């Protein structure tokens, strides 16, 4: 039973590593989880590699992404919706502005992520993860736009995608 459980836990995870730990990405193959492999109950540590013979690796840099999240659903009272959006603004860093009506809202903010996929994934989880803590209505996400910082500034410079009329805070449409 132990062998089957170990195989089930490590299936499909051979190449995955935690990236929040120094050296977590690209340090070689991940060791499978489970009981120690040496007699006497001690797991052998991986030998140190000669770092001088390897080219220096550049750590992945997080970039800023401008996110516009649109949500919609059943009509909600405006005072409670405003209070909920203000709590969300307080909880979420890089919050820019939110516009709202009784049945829809638009949230604009900056997200720090490695790439577009990560920024979009974080944005798609935002409403659901803060639904309870910010007392958000049970609306669904109906739109998402994620652009990098350079594209956002280029749009503003060219007159497209102007910043919202009320920069910062929570405002009705």
Image (cartoon, grey):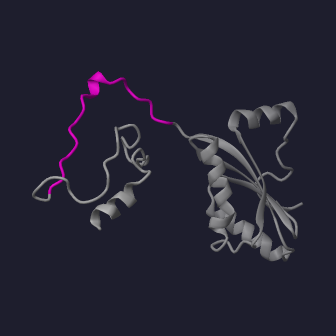
Q: Is residue 94 left or right of residue 80?
A: left
Q: Nearer the viewer, residue 46 or 90?
A: 46
Provide the residue span drawn in magenta: 42-60
Q: Nearer the viewer, residue 54 or 101?
A: 54
Q: Is residue 33 left or right of residue 118?
A: left
Residue 137, percent from left and from top: 75, 73
Using the rendered view, name the quadrant where residue 106 is placed.
bottom right
Whether residue 82 appears in magenta in the rendering, the answer is no
Q: Nearer the viewer, residue 169 or 134?
A: 134
Question: Can residue 111 be seen in the rendering of this structure?
Answer: no
Residue 131, percent from left and from top: 67, 70
Q: With respect to residue 63, does 104 lie above or below?
A: below
Q: Is residue 149 left or right of residue 44?
A: right
Q: With respect to residue 132, does 4 lie above or below?
A: above
Q: Nearer the viewer, residue 96 or 116?
A: 116
- Residue at x 58%, y 45% (from the top left corner): 113
Using the rendered view, name the quadrant where residue 41 is placed.
bottom left
- Residue at x 11%, y 55% (from the top left corner): 39
Residue 56, percent from left and from top: 37, 26
Question: What is the magenta segment's predominant secondary structure?
Answer: loop
- Residue at x 60%, y 47% (from the top left corner): 118
Q: Is residue 156 left or right of residue 11?
A: right
Question: Can residue 51 be seen in the rendering of this structure?
Answer: yes
Question: Looking at the figure, which quarter contains the C terminus?
Answer: bottom right
Question: Looking at the figure, which quarter contains the N terminus?
Answer: bottom left
User: Extreme left residue here?
Assistant: 40
Count of labels in the image = 0
Residue 81, percent from left and from top: 79, 72
């Amino acid at each position: 039973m132990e062998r089957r459980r170990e195989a089930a836990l490590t299936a499909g995870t051979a190449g995955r590593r935690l990236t929040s730990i120094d050296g977590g990405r690209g340090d070689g193959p991940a060791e499978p989880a489970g009981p120690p492999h040496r007699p006497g109950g001690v797991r052998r540590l991986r030998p140190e590699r000669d770092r001088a013979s390897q080219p220096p690796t550049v750590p992945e840099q997080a970039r800023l992404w401008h996110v516009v999240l649109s949500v919609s659903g059943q009509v909600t009272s405006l005072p409670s919706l405003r209070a909920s959006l203000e709590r969300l603004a307080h909880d979420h860093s890089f919050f820019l502005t939110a516009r709202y009506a009784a049945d829809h809202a638009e949230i604009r903010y900056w997200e720090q992520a490695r790439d577009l996929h990560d920024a979009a994934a974080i944005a798609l989880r935002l409403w659901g993860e803060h639904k309870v803590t910010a007392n958000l209505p049970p609306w669904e996400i109906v739109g998402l736009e994620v652009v990098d910082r350079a594209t956002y500034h280029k749009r503003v410079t060219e007159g497209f995608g102007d910043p919202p009329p009320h920069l910062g805070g929570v405002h009705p449409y």
